[in-house]
Amino acid sequence: MDANEKHRLYFEQMVFLFQSAALQHMGKLKNPASDKVERSLPEAQFMIDMLDMIQTRTKGNLGPDEERLLTTVIKELKLNYVDEMNKPDPAPETTQAAK
C-alpha cells in the first residue's frame, strides 16, 4: 500500500471516528465504554464543529471521494443534530434499590 492510499484510509477512519462520537453524544449510538445511551448535545456539536474545521482547512487538498464523504457526513450529522435539538431532554435514569 502506498502512502497516498494509506493517508486516504486514515482520513476516512478519522471522519468515521468523529461521526461515531457525534452520534454517541446525540444519544443515537450506545457508548461502548459505558454500554449506555448517553446524550450530550454540546459535545455532539463540538464533534460536528471539528469536522467543519477539517473541511475548511483541507479545502482544495482532498480528492473527490474524500470531499464527498466529508460533505455527506457533515450534512447527515447536522440534520440529526437539529432533530435531536427538537426533542425534549430524556428523563434521567432511575434505579431501583435491590430488595
Image (tube, rainbow, N blue to C red):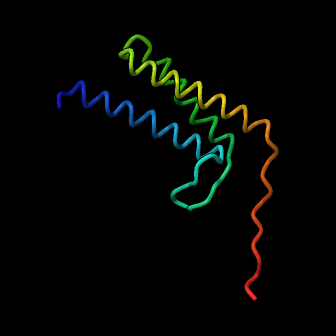
42 over 62 or under it: above or below: below
| Residue with the most extreme left position | 1
Q: Residue at x 54, y 43 (%)?
A: 21
Residue 79: % across, % down: 66, 29
72 over 99 or under it: above or below: above
Residue 33: % across, % down: 52, 59
Q: Residue 86 sits in which quadrant?
A: top right
User: Total label count?
Assistant: 0
| Residue with the most extreme top position | 60
31 over 62 or under it: above or below: below
Q: Could you tell whether 28 is left or right of 20 in the image? A: right
Q: Residue 8 sits in which quadrant?
A: top left
Q: Residue at x 66, y 34 (%)?
A: 80
Q: Residue 81 sits in which quadrant?
A: top right
Which quarter of the figure is the N terminus placed in? top left
Q: Residue at x 77, y 77 (%)?
A: 96
Q: Residue at x 39, y 37 (%)?
A: 13
2 over 13 or under it: above or below: above
Residue 18: % across, % down: 50, 37
Q: Could you tell whether 50 is left or right of 94 in the image? A: left
Which quarter of the figure is the C terminus placed in? bottom right
**39 and 83: which one is in front?**
83
